[in-house]
Image: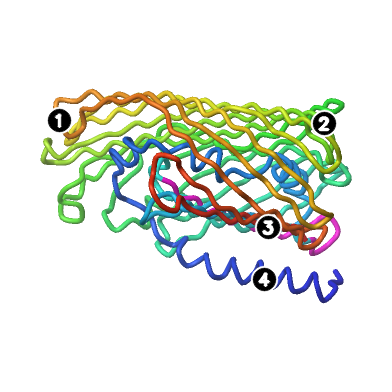
Amino acid sequence: MTYSFTQGNRFAAALFILVLLVPSAYCREDDWFYDEGKKDKLLFLHTLVNYELNPHWWFVWDENLLRESALKFSFGSVEIHDLLINARLMMNEKIADGTYFQADMDWYRSHWVNREKKNLYLGLEQNVVSGLGFFVQFNPYFNKEYIDARLGVVYADEDRRRYIRLAAQWDDFLWQEKNPQKGEYTNSPLALFWQFRQNIGKVWFFSEGYWGSEYGKQFNNIEKEPLLSAEKGRNAEITVRIYYGDRERLPLYLTAYHYRFFTSQTYRNAPDSKSYDNRITTVGLEYKYYFSDDFSLRVGARYVWQASIAKGAVEFDYGRRELMPSLFAEYHINDKNSIELAVMESFYDWQSNSGNETYKFAEKGNIEKVKLGWDIRLTPNTRVQISLSHVFSIWGFGGGNIQYLMYF
């Protein structure tokens, strides 16, 4: 494969970012975020509206997921001490006819995600006949017992813009042989992983996610594990994006997302035992009206359902409903520069029932936010947005966000 000087620089930059982020992927989060962000009025308005990628950016990302190497990220100020981290690097390098080296680095951190997501899947994809093939990937960790594996089948059309990938995902597949506590599986952490993109005329469908069965572990060796006697858990993450239009104009955009995190730990000292189950579902709809080639308006809304239940050492039953309408105005100054002005609001309603006054609270209300963004098209395949935002009810500077998308 031959690279121009510019392409080579992009590849080197992406590889540098990959090397920079990989060491942090070797850590396993074990903290329990029972009440993280539960009272935050801007919890979802930041991450799902203000710092969310433009639907057109998502369309390009989905389109190039298997046909190009691509990098995207969004970093935004959430609180005085906290930063949203949303970064992903996809590499699809053809190393022989029908053979691709693939890397999928995914790093996400926000209050509503109970464990920081740091994955780096590396592997190969091999075409067998007419776009039908298989792929194998591994997600390495410094602690060998946490290495993950995927084995699946893939079908892609000739230019790889339409595809379907299905894989069996086995998390921590070496855990029973390598864990220092001498624990054993009662149920292995198996999941179905998928990536899908297809269209019917001008309607484009994309979905990605994984859905796993409940895993179980037991610890019978008291000398190696004196405290924990059993553990179980389950994880799921499902993303759906539907577009109407073409690559240049997308008047309608629908998105849906479901998050599930469940974990339970049983200790030999029963009062220390605890479990936590968190489910979040969000649905969003946007309509974009093009007044001209240079000026357009996006009007939309997102709705969030959240239910969290904690039992054991900490107990509460938390529910949240939130509606977030938004209006985005986009003006193209020229081929390389655009200005975006947005107004968004959250109508939130949350309630937490608990025998402990610390975890017993309820509140409903609304909060507004504005955004001013500058979108720069650095090259035909590279763009960046830098923005400032402010919350009306909070004195002082609100925060900033930088978004970046590149494919090569």
Measured in 3D between alpha carbons, the distance from the residue under mark 2 to the one under mark 4, in whole angstroms, is: 33 Å
Query: Gap between marks 2 and 3, in whole Å?
Result: 23 Å
* Numbered tag placed on residue 13 in the rendering: 4
Q: What's the CA distance linking mark 1 and mark 2?
A: 51 Å
Q: Nearer the viewer, residue 298 or 108?
A: 298
Q: Residues within 10 Å of mark 2 (few under 14, many from 20)?
A: some
- Under mark 2, the amino acid is Gly
Say which of marks 3 and 1 sits in front: 3
**Res. 69 in view:** no
Query: Picture quarter containing residue 6?
Result: bottom right
Vertical order, 58 against 100 (above or below):
above
Helix, strand or loop at label 2? It is loop
Crowding near the residue tagged with mark 3, few <14, some 14–19, many ≥20 C-alpha atoms within 10 Å? some
Q: Which residue is mark 2?
A: 245
- First-in-chain label (2 vs 3): 2
Label drawn at residue 260? none
- Can residue 326 be found in the magenta stretch? no
Residue 259 appears left or right of 378: left
Q: Amino acid at mark 1?
A: Glu
Reading the image, the residue beneath label 3 is 384
Q: Which span is picked out in magenta?
A: 94-110
The image quadrant where one finds the N terminus is bottom right
Q: Nearer the viewer, residue 142 or 186?
A: 142
Q: What label sits on residue 357 in the rendered view? A: 1
Figure check: 49 above or below 316: below
